[in-house]
Image (tube, helix red, strand yellow):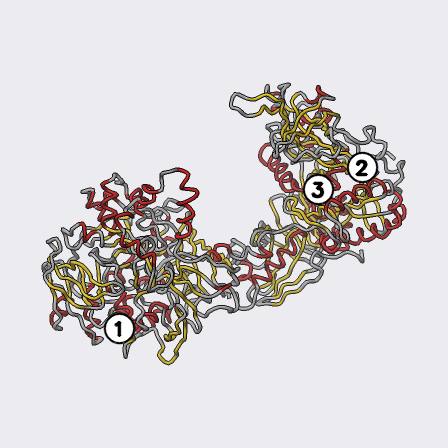
Amino acid sequence: MSNAVSALQDAVFKGSVTIKDAGLQGMITLRGDLSSDALAKAVKTATGTAIPETGCINSGKKGAAAWMSPDELLLLVDYAQAETIVAKLDKALAGTHMLASNVSDARAVFTIEGKGIRDVLAKGSPADMSAGTLGINTLRRTRLGQLPVAFWLGSETTATVICFRSVGEHVFNWLSTAAQKGSLPGHYT
Amino acid sequence: MSTRLQNGGRLIDRTKQIEFTWNGKRLQGFQGDTLASALLANNQMLVGRSFKYHRPRGIVAAGPEEPNALMGTGVDGHFEPNQRATTTELYQGLTSHSQNHWPSLEIDIGALNSKLPRFFPAGFYYKTFMYPRAAWKHVFEPIIRKSAGLGKAPTHKDEDTYEYFYAHVDIMIVGGGIAGLAAALTAGKSGASVLLMEQGVSFGGRAITDGVEIDGKPAATWVKATLAALKKMPNVQIRTRMMGAGVYDHGYALGYERLTDHLGPNQNGPRHRLWRIRTKRIVTATGAIERPLSFAGNDIPGVMLAGSLRDYIADYGVSAGDRTVVVTNNDDGYRTAIALHEAGLNVPCIIDPRGDLDGELPQKAIALGIRVENKSAIGKVKGGKRVESVTLCAQAGEGGTLEEIKCDAVAMSGGWSPVVHLWSHCGGKLNWDTDLAMFRPDPSRPPLGADGTGFVIATGTANGHLYSASVLKDAIAAGKQAAKDAGFKATGTVPKASDEKAAPIAAVWSMPQGATYDLKSKTFLDYQNDVKVSDVRLAAQEGFTSVEHAKRYTTLGMATDQGKLSNINGLAVLADSLNKEIPQVGTTTFRPPYHPISFGAIVGDARGELFKPIRKSPIHQWIDDNGGDWEPVADWRRPYCYKQQGETVEQAVTREILNTRENCGLLDASTLGKIIVKGPDAGKFMDMMYTNMMSTLKVGFCRYGLMCTENGFLSDDGVVARLSENTYLCHTTSGGSDRIHAWMEEWLQTEWWDWKVYTANVTEQYAQIAIVGPNARKVLEKLGGMDVSPEALPFMQFRDGKIGGIQARPFRISFSGELSYEIAVPASQGQAFWDMCMEAGAEFGMQPYGTECLHVMRAEKGFIMIGDETDGTVIPQDLGLNWAISKKKEDFLGKRAQQRSHMTDSKRWKLVGLKPVDPQAVIPDGAYATDGTTRPNGVKNMIGRVTSTYFSPTLNHAIAMGLVEHGPDRMGEVIDFPTIGGDIIKAEICDPVFLDKEGARQNV
């Protein structure tokens, strides 16, 4: 897999915040009964975390689990391990109604670092970005400008944005535009 | 003349001089000036020409209500027309010019129109340009277009940037006067999140200008202390240069923030920011706008609103004239007279139509020795480009001159109208207050939110409270109410303020009362659109009795100021003409935005490369670097062809087709939709979604399938692969991936919610690369890793494995009729795989090909294309695809619809091949076939149409497909396709499969 490349190939933009292509990130769509013990166990094995609460992301030693819908999780795992983990999930949940699919290459992932992350994201997302509503590790499925994205804050100065791979360049450019120096409204800082 | 005073001007900094140009003249102002105050300081009272009569126009107001002083500002990429001088802050190097005149502001040929007002009455356009009909297109419209519009359209691309910002707050407060501040302080103390916005740059509003005292101190002291307290509250945000632009349903509001307009061009960051705000309560503390009085010549430069004239003195240290006549129907106008007097300027007379003048302010004016004439009116203002004098007459009379008073400015006050725009945008209702002569918000009929409660609270002057004591009381109550409604508990004490005892206003809509027609036709209501009292009266006479009709007929209030000064006066005149009360006539509709906002702010960041998101495949950059000639396919870009050195598009396409048929071609098919369908009920689900039987497909096999809407029409097609016992992979068209995934989920979530089926859209997980042509297998064998022999991987099957070290899933499917493998690899390795194929294929004649080559090759094979052969009205049966429609299945989406009589009608146009008699004659796209007869309506009778048409280099012959009435029964018949030029192309109806019907080329 030495010839595998992420959509933006390590692009970086430094403005009022820093935008970075996060590189190759293992991602698995897991659909199933989120209340089942078997699924919880399988997720724990895969990522080291428990099933997240509605609208949240749990991070563990081996990865993270994000709540996408009442019957869907997005598991973040090591890129090289994604196929193997899908196979393990299939095996662990064999006989139950489930779907696990490697979607690592279907997405682009960006990290945003800096004090102004809420201000930057609020330029494009109609979601409430205030700390009371978008707490640390709340996963928000929303849009940024014209495109669907999901994001969460790992801390008050780091955010991760996921979008579809084909529009990764647009989202990166959008973020870079929103993060131009001197352009933050300072609503959240 | 207007000039800068020696002293005063609380908003300007006299130590900071600013140079600017206006109509090419270099002028000076001070930091803190608006363009309007700076122009007045330079004795520039004449600032523009009106729209219809090109009459000279001067500055009337000091705020956003200004109708006249519209300027073009900036140059080239920073040029913007129709900027209000009164809201344009002066900056070093500002370039500006006046509008709507030719050849110059001073000498304007269009002013001839004003000598001919008789020919431009209300409804002039409707009456004049009716006949002859042809003249509209060739004579009238071109001339009107030339003269229309006040400012010039920009000729350069806007160089500034703009953006949106989404904010969620508990309470939004619009207006930074004492009402807004008091409400914000009260709401802020409750702990609610508060966003306070002020359209200007300073707080306190009129209270400071007019010398109000709060808690025994000047208002400015209270404002300063309150601002300081607000700034300490982390839950309160304060924004200046931000206007509340509009209020919409569900507590949604727009704020328009001007970030760099006051600094000039080439600043960091966006010029404007459009705030899209969700809030629980909106408090509008937007103040009031003074009304003009309707007397003859009230549009002559030098006639200004009394309050604004006072603003120029107090805020900018600018006087409008040395001798100012004040005309007012209320006590507030006297403030201006007193302010002028205190500034050492002359007030020859205060003219007041009222009888008793026992209010404190009139008494003070009289005590100062200013001449006051009661029961009086201005007969007319004399002057051309500048006021020269006014005639004094009795208000009760017809305008007979009692005396002529020399002056160079007139300050008029017709009373104040609360700014109810934001209250009204979303349906808040108004009451007419007869005593105060104003429309004010009716608190019992506010705009209602989703929970049925009012979500806008008007307060202060905007709520009809004209005096500071009641303003503050109302504002504290509004702050408390907003906090309470938003779920917080607020307390607050009302600061003490005292006001002069005032005499009541007199509602004066015409001055003098019995003004003659001659005077009325010089009495302007709408300065920008030249609507006069006589025009509104004429409209009423001609039957335009509804205020909305009268508005449109006369264009009253339809200019860029949206009637901020003219609407109330106009509807009062209309009411009088109709002999009705004002509330019976009512107001026109208040619509957002309150004041014009820039197109840039509306567009936000969606311009240039961010205008439209474009989906890019993993091979996009390579294609771009290698001659790809892009065409849009849904949101993707795909190469139409790859142009080599010196080639035309046609030459490239021909080369690609011949090469692929003879050697080997490489196609980026990554854009095809890929949806996984999995679950115990997946087979059942697939049988419903597709017209074919999919549940019988064996694992490892592929099948071409059709999807229809519930109305039976063909919606999408593609190859289905069965990955495992309960897992299918559905390929969709490039444009269909999101739509079909949503379509599947809709059925699963709304109709078949109890079926155990999951779907996942994995379109972008894979790069899909088609290796096509007689040498395709040789290339794959060279790459190695998988057995791709006909035995190991037969036609219409797939296998998983590795090719060239990359995880791959080759599907043996063919859209070209050639030996073909479509290979799915991880998207991140798509480019690597593509490079390998190009390299390995070099010795076998490998060349990339684009979508046109793909199209021609599929047409040679008679394969349909969604969007070409289908248009939303075509069913699979029309296309001869009955073989793909299962007769065994009990049901599938579209089955019932396809049994309707119209769908089974034998006269439906059906798919056939079309072979032009002239082998070189390509039938134009979309051409219709005719049978030589004519329909009763005189139109040629059409019996079919072309759906795909190409020149086939393989066959060296033009080919086409089309839908023709009874087509399949008419093989060999020649039919006519008339072209736009009048020629007829004759084509023979034939089998749509032009090449290799038996499939020998692909089954190798």
Mark 3 residue crowding within 10 angstroms, few (<14) / some (14–19) / many (20+): many
Q: Toward which corner of the image does residue B53 lie, by quadrant? A: bottom left
The amino acid sitting under disc 1 is Pro
| Residue identifier under label 3 | B674
Extreme-bottom residue of the structure: B15
Q: Earlier in the sequence, mark 2 or mark 1?
A: 1
Q: Which residue is mark 2?
A: B954
Kindly report which numbered mark, 3 or 2, lies closer to the viewer in this rendering.
2
Q: Is residue B182 left or right of residue A153?
A: left
Residue B695 horizontal/vertical position (percent):
73, 30
Circle 1 residue: B218
Identified at 47% across, 63% down, the residue is B79
Cα distance, mark 2 to mark 1? Answer: 92 Å
| Label 1 secondary element | strand
Q: Does residue A153 appear left or right of residue B686 in this picture? A: left
- Type of residue at label 2? Thr
Q: Which residue is nearer to you in this view: B543 or B589?
A: B543
User: Looking at the image, is mark 3 or mark 1 earlier in the sequence?
Assistant: 1
Image position, residue B463 (x, y; %): 28, 55
**Same subunit, tags 3 and 2:** yes
Q: Amino acid at mark 3?
A: Lys
Q: Look at the picture and state if B978 lies above or below B97.
A: above
